[in-house]
Amino acid sequence: MTGERLAETFAPIEALIFDMDGLLVDSEPIAEQAMERFLQLHGHTLRPGTTERTLGRRVPDAMLVIAEIYGITLPIAELIDTYDQLRLAALRGKLLPMPGAAALLTYGRAAGLKLALATSSLRSHADLSLAETRLAGLFDAEATGDDVVNGKPAPDIFLLAAERLGTPPAACVVLEDAPAGLAAAAAAGMRRIWVPNIKTRDLPVAVAVDLTAPDLEAVIPWLETHGVKTPASAEKESFSGMADRHLGASDADNRRSPRQA
């Protein structure tokens, strides 16, 4: 169910709430490598479809799924610690922003929208990911997997992000790559935009969405047709160009992810 959804009552758009992994940051292939190493340490090999069952979920929730699939009986806290260290080590020096990430963030800021991050990743992972992709400091509020007890598909993390922004849920638009996140956004009473990547584009989505976009920059025209005013600066310069100035021109060329939906 990915088409235009049934009419619901929403306020004018005031805020964009972004997932991180697989949406803003091209981290999921690297995280899969860390999962392969994690399972090897416990005498297992990664089976097809395993990572798809953990996409969008907090590390504790993902470890519960992994322990059940592979029959690992060690304490969950120990599994979390081992995987956490492997994933952090794998991410360092290898992260790229997803196509259009900086452009949409730049547009949102210029249009006067509030921006929030709502990621299931731990705070340590979020800080590393945003720093390495030059996206740190662009958000008005952040919520991570450490901040909530109930992870996606529960709505808690999106509701917390909206609360920290001081924005009602009905005025928020959630951008997600994973079905669990889209379900969480629906449960939170927020508009939702699906930007699938190579790992999530064939997964079933149980809730209807407002838009399915090939990349984040493609969301800009939809926002403009839904009442977000294009900043005057856009008349002379594309938001890709503005984003390149934020990243630094040569750095932007080097750090754009080639992986697209």
Image (cartoon, helix red, strand yellow):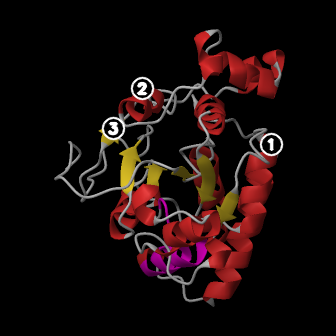
Which residue lies under the disc numbered 3? 212
**Mark 2 or 3, nearer chain start:** 3
Which residue lies under the disc numbered 1? 132
Is residue 156 placed above or below 109 in the rendered structure?
below
First to last magenta residue range: 55-68
Q: Nearer the viewer, mark 2 or mark 1?
A: 2
How many angstroms separate mark 1 from mark 3 (CA)? Answer: 27 Å
How many angstroms separate mark 2 from mark 3 (CA)? Answer: 12 Å
Residue 49 can be seen in this image: no
Is residue 37 placed above or below 112 in the rendered structure?
below
Residue 95 on image: x %, y %: 72, 40
The residue under the point 30% across, 44% down is 210
Q: Amino acid at mark 1?
A: Glu
Q: Amino acid at mark 3?
A: Thr
Which residue lies under the disc numbered 2? 221
Task: Give the secondary structure at mark 3.
Answer: strand
Occupied quadrant, residue 162: bottom right
Which is more toward the observer, 120 or 10?
10
Which is more toward the observer, 230 or 239?
230
